[in-house]
């Protein structure tokens, strides 16, 4: 009985079920009784979005950093060139459609949300891709690399284009620099436990981002890059990664399950949108993700082909089209960027609904896979 319970909890954590349940719960509660939902979620909004989500972005930064190490998919310029071009297209395409739509519809108040449809949700897109392509299909590592690079671009966009207040670079540089300095001293002293890095450097970096006017949820990103790590990348979701003794992998292994619970609370706190608030922002985000993502990915990959770059062995252009549709699942990061781009109100709620609707990308991808004859590779 205990083993079965443990297996069930593991399944829930590994498949982002808590995020999905939290999202649905928030959406339903808000539409049944907005006042009580708001009274519960409003007091914890800051703690969830500005503090707890730092651990989510810390894990995302860890995957980006390790992809740059020897053996990682971003370590070789030639190997990474085509997926990186596809990533660039997968960000420019949605942003262009969003901005063009806002301009054509004469909605200048929506322009600030241009980055919302640039996101790709790693967890849900990975699950959808495994179902559509099979675990052994070359499209899977291509998608993961695209999603990792997309996360890296998303972190940069958040830092550069979405300050939370007037930027104070002196406060930012002083506090974050001190936090990185402490982490490097710990690293030089061969401290392999991740807790001193998080407990000493983490709060200092958070204050640097907060007082510096940048989003504090990114506070662990510079600390991640300063922690002891493996000398080579073993791959995202690689088996045996939990056995690595370095501080960076310890951090990821300890926080992986709590972060899934944090994402559940994040979904609950942020997904409470009234259906009556569906509006222009909803469709700008939705079309940006569903249409702009695959369009940008395919067009920029064709550009790569003109420069003699190629898709991975065994991957066809039909597969790339379907992969682009899968990448249109923005959800978690799109929902987060929505909360950063707009203040509380109907505009924010409309944009959030577009992020929620992006789950439809999975259905679009499944239909496209059937029509384009994608071969499933499970063995």
Image (cartoon, rainbow, N blue to C red):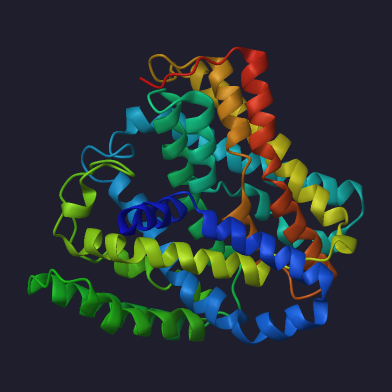
- Residue 70, percent from left and from top: 21, 41
The residue furthest left is 189
- Residue in the foreground of this view, choosing between 90 and 54: 54
Task: Examine the rendering and report whether any part of residue 141 can be seen.
Answer: yes
Quarter of the image for residue 302 reads: top right
Relative to 371, residue 219 above or below: below
How many numbered marks appear? 0
Q: Residue at x 23, y 76 (%)?
A: 195
Q: Is residue 44 above or below residue 71?
A: below
Would you identify the image quadrant in which residue 298 lies? top right
Give percent across and percent down for residue 276.
90, 62
Name which residue lies at 60% across and 12% down.
Answer: 373
Viewer can see residue 165 = no
Answer left or right for 305 relative to 292.
left
Instruction: Check the image and report above or below for 203 versus 150.
Output: below
The image position of residue 141, as x and y in percent, is 39, 32
Residue at 37% x, 24% y: name it.
136
Indicate left or right for 366 with 13 as reference.
right
Q: Position of residue 274 (x, y in %)?
A: 83, 66
Q: In the shown orientation, is residue 212 left or right of residue 39? A: left
Q: Is residue 347 left or right of residue 40?
A: right
- Where, quadrant-wise, is the N terminus in this rendering? bottom left
Quarter placement of the C terminus? top left
Q: Residue at x 68, y 60 (%)?
A: 24
In this view, the residue farthest toward the front is 1
Tell me the quarter of the picture where residue 377 sits: top left
């Amino acid at each position: 009985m205990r083993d079965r319970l443990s297996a069930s909890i593991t399944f829930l954590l590994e498949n982002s079920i808590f995020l999905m349940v939290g999202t649905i719960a928030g959406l339903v509660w808000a539409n049944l009784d907005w006042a009580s939902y708001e009274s519960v979620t409003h007091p914890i909004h800051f703690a969830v979005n500005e503090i707890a989500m730092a651990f989510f972005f810390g894990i995302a930064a860890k995957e980006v950093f390790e992809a740059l190490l020897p053996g990682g998919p971003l370590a070789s310029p030639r190997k990474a060139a085509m997926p990186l071009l596809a990533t660039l297209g997968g960000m420019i395409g949605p942003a262009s459609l969003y901005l063009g739509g806002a301009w054509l519809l004469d909605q200048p108040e929506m322009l600030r949300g241009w980055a919302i449809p640039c996101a790709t949700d790693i967890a849900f897109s990975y699950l959808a891709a495994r179902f559509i392509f099979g675990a052994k299909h070359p499209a899977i590592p291509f998608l993961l690399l695209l999603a990792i690079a997309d996360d890296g671009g998303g972190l940069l966009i958040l830092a550069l284009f979405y300050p939370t207040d007037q930027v104070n670079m002196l406060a930012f540089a002083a506090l974050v620099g001190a936090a990185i300095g402490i982490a490097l001293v710990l690293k030089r002293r061969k401290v392999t436990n991740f807790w001193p890095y998080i407990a000493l450097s983490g709060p200092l970096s958070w204050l640097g981002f907060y007082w510096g006017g940048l989003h504090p949820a990114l506070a662990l990103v510079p600390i991640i890059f300063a922690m002891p790590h493996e000398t080579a990348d073993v791959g995202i979701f690689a088996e045996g990664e939990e056995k690595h003794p370095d501080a960076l992998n310890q951090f990821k292994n300890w926080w992986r399950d709590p972060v899934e619970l944090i994402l559940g609370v994040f979904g609950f706190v942020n997904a409470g949108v009234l259906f009556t608030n569906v509006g222009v922002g909803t469709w700008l985000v939705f079309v940006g993700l569903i249409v702009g993502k695959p369009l940008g990915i395919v067009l920029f990959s064709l550009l790569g082909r003109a420069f003699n770059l190629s898709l991975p062995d065994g991957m066809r252009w039909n597969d790339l089209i379907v992969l682009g549709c899968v990448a249109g699942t923005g959800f978690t990061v799109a929902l987060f960027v929505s909360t950063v781009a707009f203040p509380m109100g109907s505009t924010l709620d409309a944009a959030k609904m577009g992020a929620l609707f992006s789950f439809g990308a999975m259905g679009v991808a499944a239909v496209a896979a059937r029509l384009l004859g994608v071969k499933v590779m499970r063995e």
